[in-house]
Amino acid sequence: MSDAEIATYLMLRYMRALRPGKHALYGVFVTSGYRETFFRQHRSTWRSVEMLYRLRLIDKMPATGRAFRTGNVADPKIKEKTARKPVVRYKINDDGLRVNALPTAWQVLTEPTPQDLIRREHGPLAERAGPTLSDLFTMLGAVDRPAGTRARDGT
């Protein structure tokens, strides 16, 4: 892991320790002001949260009013400078630390499975929805495999 990823992971673990009940139910978030003032973590460092999510170390919870994949605010009224933006919440995935990191990272980055792609595009709730929903996303083309990659079964 990079320095930025380690710092981001430790920050989220700290937030979980502060609010264990909220973390268990909804996940935790860090506002940009708190993140920059208390943790000295600017936006470029904070973006490492995406790699932590892809490597299954954290779960990103869907936020109403934001596109899951990009985090962009969709509603023009919410985009106004004075409007309160919906927060994105994260949950630490302790199971992610129980597996060997190198094979997991290599597989996620070089040969993402359909489940990896569903997780990346639609989030952990869609990933847990089961094979029927996975099949639906596949039929709709939502999990088209990037060029040069193949599924674990060799297809």
Image (cartoon, rainbow, N blue to C red):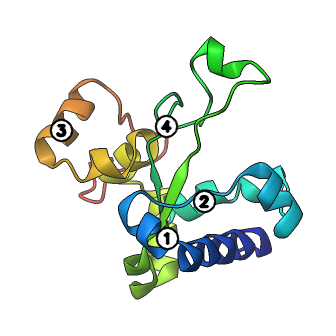
Residue situated in front as seen by the camera: 5 or 12: 12
Q: Secondary structure at mark 4?
A: loop
Q: Which residue is mark 2?
A: 51
Q: Mark 3: which amino acid?
A: Leu
Residue annotated with mark 3: 133
Q: How far apart are labels 3 and 2 at the CA level?
A: 24 Å
Measured in 3D between alpha carbons, the distance from the residue under mark 4 to the one under mark 1, in whole angstroms, is 17 Å
x and y percent of residue 146 in the render? 47, 39
Q: Amino acid at mark 4?
A: Phe
Numbered mark located on residue 68 in the image: 4
Q: Secondary structure at mark 1?
A: loop
Q: Which numbered disc flags the more N-terminal residue, 4 or 3?
A: 4
Which residue in the protein does label 1 denote?
Answer: 57
- Please indicate, yes or no, whether residue 109 appears anywhere in the rendered image: no
Mark 4 and mark 3: Cα distance apart in space:
17 Å
Q: Quadrant of residue 83?
A: top right
